[in-house]
Amino acid sequence: MVKELLSQWETEVELVDVLENPQSKTYLESQGIPFVPALEWDGEWVQGWYGEDYAQLLGVEYTGPSMLPAGELAERMLKVLKTFLKIAEAVPLELLDFEAPQGNRTLRDLLFHSFRVAGTLVESLEGGFKQPDTPLKSPGGTELANRAALVVLGEETLWRVENCLASREEVIRTGSLKTRDGQMSVHKLLERATWHCTQHLRQVDDILRIAKVTPSVEVEASLFQGLPLPESIW
């Protein structure tokens, strides 16, 4: 996701995967950066997915939209999750393992990851930030080898998110909580989770286009409006 954010400014940076390069994780910890993503530029750091903070660090103009009202963000998140769920139910089974040429994730990976991002939002609102018990990346193997398991995850996530947001309307508008990136308004946390999932919906929609598959699911263009999405899909 950081790559997509930075691509719009045509700034050359070195992307490092801490899972493949354990030394980089040690370096981050030595700099007081406990989690990724993080961006270093001229000895200064920004941690988390924040386009406006990246732009300030790099000295470029940030032209993203103003933050949508909390209620509108909540509705958008639910619409995005419902769209993911419909796609998981409708696409041909063999397409779940289709990998876009521009990315290194399959459709199954993107659906799983997006459901977990939304689930982590719920976990943060219910109990404050902690490392998620379930990984955000698809576990592979047989755990999600069939469509039914993926659909069940999507249904459970949608139910959890819908109930959590409905019962915390005031907290979402005015509250704050501790996150891995420090104290943050719940409104901003909701925006981050919403645009994160929505960016992956753009990628899922692109996979469907590349694979020339038209499931009986329409990805509404309006879902992409008003969010600080990067210009690049990938």
Image (cartoon, rainbow, N blue to C red):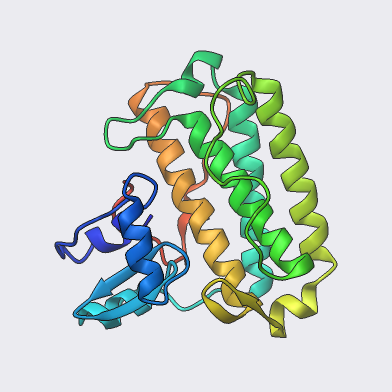
Q: Is residue 230 visible?
A: no
User: Measured from the top left, where is residue 50 in percent x and y?
Assistant: 41, 72
Res. 112 image quadrant? top right
- Label total for image: 0
User: Measured from the top left, where is residue 90 in percent x and y?
Assistant: 61, 23
Residue drawn 56% across the image and 60% down it: 194
21 on left or right of 154: left
3 on left or right of 142: left
User: Measured from the top left, where is residue 147 in percent x and y?
Assistant: 64, 21
31 on left or right of 79: left
Instruction: Give the answer, above or below, for where 233 lies relative to 129.
Output: above
Q: On the rendered image, what quadrant is the N terminus found in? A: bottom left
Res. 144 image quadrant? top right
> Which is nearer the eye, 126 or 52?
126
Residue drawn 37% across the image and 73% down it: 30
User: Measured from the top left, where is residue 42 in percent x and y?
Assistant: 19, 80
Q: Is residue 93 visible?
A: yes
Res. 183 image quadrant? bottom right
Residue drawn 70% across the image and 80% down it: 173
